[in-house]
Image: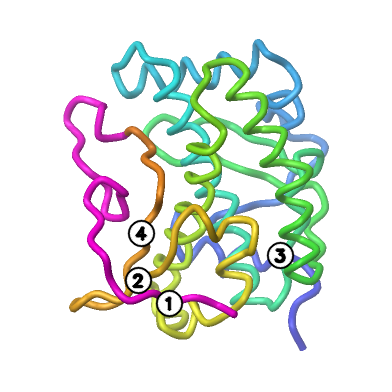
Amino acid sequence: MPPSAVPFESLSALGPFFALDELRIEQSGWTGVRRLIGDPTATDEAIDLYAGRLGISRRDIAGSLLVQGWAGRLTSVLAGCQVLAHGVPDLAAANLAYRFVEGAPVELRITDPALDEVTVGWQRLIDLHLEPLIAAVDGRCRAGRRRLWGNVAAALAGSVGSLARAGVATLDELTCLPWTQPAGLRDLGEWVTTPSGLRYARRTCCNLVRVPGYGLCSDCVIDREPRGRRTIE
């Protein structure tokens, strides 16, 4: 019988992007995600933190990469739970708290770890977390909403790829599952067949290439060549 709550230890074993823990009342030093979304000061602080870490002055690039990293954490938790436990937690902003840590992905903790069906969990993540987060970030730095949603699509693809590399399932198996290619994100990228195997090809650029010391991402639209498509009907 699948677990009824988040399998915290199993998630953490997959890597830092998958890690999640339960938030307890007595714990301090954590900020509710609703503040990041609803308080412009908190949104600015997060964007400026990323700009400082990257050594750049362009807040639009910092905001783009903030959303990309944030979405990477959320989609990894969702994907990991679905594969390991056949259910996903409520990843709405109201159910999560965060803490930025130097040199590591943002830490996340959850108030209610109960699991639900993946389509329900995905819609709550979109409507009650990612949509308002993107609106908040774009409103503070004009990163571009399509770019930011492209980051979400790429983040989900990256999470799926990480699960395959962890040996949980093959990439072929994972990309055949409907939840790995949500309808609302399909025009932002696709899985393509290349001589070396499946690769995700996005249709927007996160702008990491404009950060000194970085090059093109493996899924970058700038470096895309036509290949056979892998789609879900």
Disc nearest the viewer among 3 and 4: 4
Q: In the structure shown, which secondary structural element does the residue marked by tag 3 occupy?
A: loop
- Distance from label 2 to label 4 (Cα)? 7 Å
- Kindly identify the amino acid type of the residue bearing the numbered disc 3: Val
Q: Which residue is mark 3?
A: 6
Which label's residue is closer to the chain start, 4 or 1? 4
Which label's residue is closer to the chain start, 3 or 1? 3
Which residue is drawn at the image coordinates 77% and 45% (left, top)?
A: 127
Which residue is drawn at the image coordinates 19% and 39% (left, top)?
A: 215
- Distance from label 2 to label 1 (Cα)? 6 Å
Q: Position of residue 112 (x, y in %)?
A: 82, 53
Which label's residue is closer to the chain start, 3 or 4? 3
Q: Which residue is mark 4?
A: 201
- Distance from label 3 to label 4 (Cα)? 31 Å
- Distance from label 4 to label 1 (Cα)? 11 Å
Structural crowding at the residue carrying mark 1, measured as other residues with C-alpha within 10 Å and reported as few (<14), some (14–19) or many (≥20): some
State which quadrant residue 39 falls in.
top right
Q: Which residue is mark 1?
A: 230
- Kindly identify the amino acid type of the residue bearing the numbered disc 1: Arg
- Kindly identify the amino acid type of the residue bearing the numbered disc 4: Ala
State which quadrant residue 6 falls in.
bottom right
Q: Is residue 212 above or below residue 226?
A: above
Magenta highlight range: 208-233
Q: Which residue is mark 2?
A: 192
